[in-house]
Amino acid sequence: MPVLNPRALNPRAPNPRALNADTRHTVTITLNGRPRSGQAHPRLLLSDFLRHELGAHGTRVGCEHGVCGACTVRLDGIAVRACLTLAVQADGRRVDTVEGLAEANQGRMTALQEAFRRHHALQCGFCTAGILMSLSDWLERTPNPTDEELRDMLSGHLCRCTGYAGIVRAVMDVTGQAIPSGESAHV
Amino acid sequence: MKPAPFDYLRPATVADALAALAAGGDDARVIAGGQSLMPMLNMRLVQPRLLIDLGGLSELGTLRAEDGWLTVGAAVTQAQALARPGLTDEVPLLAAALPWVGHVQTRNRGTLCGSVAHADPSAEVPLCLVATGGEVVLRNAGRRRTVAAADFFLGPLTTARAADEIVESLRFPLAAPGSGHAFREMSMRHGDFAIVACAATATAERIGLAVGGVADRPTARSWPLAPGGALPPDLDAHLNAFAWELGGDDDQHASARYRRELVRRIGRTVLEEALSCRS
């Protein structure tokens, strides 16, 4: 009995210039400043490409539909959801992940990461990579955020440990602003 | 939570994309920012055979105000529109509503045209398009046509777009001098889909209210102002009738009764705000 090819059921011929669904294609990105290549089916998410193909496990995978923010990376400098981006869409572009923060800082944690540690802005750490990548982009454009602006931006990330208070304190500290009153004495 | 297999095409021109869409028919889908379509792909609610990526096409990057309209091309992200310095003067309602669309991180990729093509009944951009009397420009391989926003949305995730067409651009009327605008919504958490979203417009003669999240599509009504430019004395009765006409259902987020109450209350609030902020 012949093996049924699902494409045989479709009378439409595949587009000859499209990347074929059943073939792995070479995707090359600049990951944290270094060119890296891997293979990807068109349906492979950038989050899975980073983790499974390039071994960059700093980026976490949470909800896989754009809600939780754990997989946030910077694509050409802009914070985006890696789970809502295809690996083939990132081909030829720059991707920055949490591993790159210290790598670009002589191997030491950045001031933002140090502030996170100091203010207990993380507990289990699952959401932290995404939040750091969002902040590293956002603070460049919003260097002195208000508490309200910061919490609005953080609404794009789910953290189940900290209640966000430590994260707000860390960002206020690293941006040289007053730490919200009544919350500074105790972490 | 991984998409089903599809072929992926990054066309060099819009003409290439339209030819591929015509050949692909119902089995092809267009992606730009992907902030609505990618979750649908990940959850396998949509399983196209061919994905055509408009994201890199500079032809679709138009963001321009001229001849009384703001034109927003298919590749323009919500973040780009929000960062446009003149937006608060050109289409103040859109400037007020865009911060409510998803989150900073999704607005960085999500497009206005994509939100309109997706047609979620609670989405903010379709609501603003209906509230302002905007238009959707559709294009296929052979022609271009313009559909009024009020005629474009047919139901949840259902629009007047044919399978071989893309939403090439949106056209928002530039705010007239002396008009007022206001936007508010209620959601469980900031960035969630709205339970009820209300967009109000006010001119010298009329006030208009568009509501999202209740009916199966964004829906607008308008009423004449009372003599002297005050709110109509029977506004509460109008709002109550409108709230019932919208015909919302109970769901896991809110009851129909709560939705009607939000339409009455938020509706009045935004209408008062729109009237008082007329320039």
Image: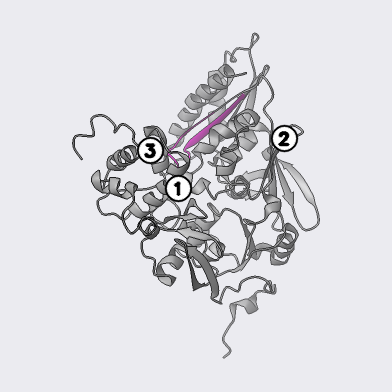
**Vertical side of B264 occupied by B82: above or below:** below
Magenta stretch: residue B120 in it? no
For mark 3, give the secondary structure: helix
Categorize mark 1 by other alpha carbons within 10 Å: few (<14), some (14-19), many (20+): some
Q: Which residue is mark 2?
A: B69
- Span colored in magenta: B183-201
Pointer 1: what residue?
A137
Q: Which residue is the site of mark 3?
A: A151
**Type of amino acid under label 3:** Arg
Left or right for B265, reference A183: right
Position of B12 relative to B111 (above/below): below
Q: Position of residue B48 (x, y in %)?
A: 59, 65
Q: Earlier in the sequence, mark 3 or mark 1?
A: 1
Seen from this angle, which residue lies furthest front? A106
Residue B186: within the magenta?
yes
* Residue B87 appears in the rendering: yes
For disc 3, the chain is: A
The chain holding disc 2 is B
Which residue occupies 74% across, 35% down?
B66
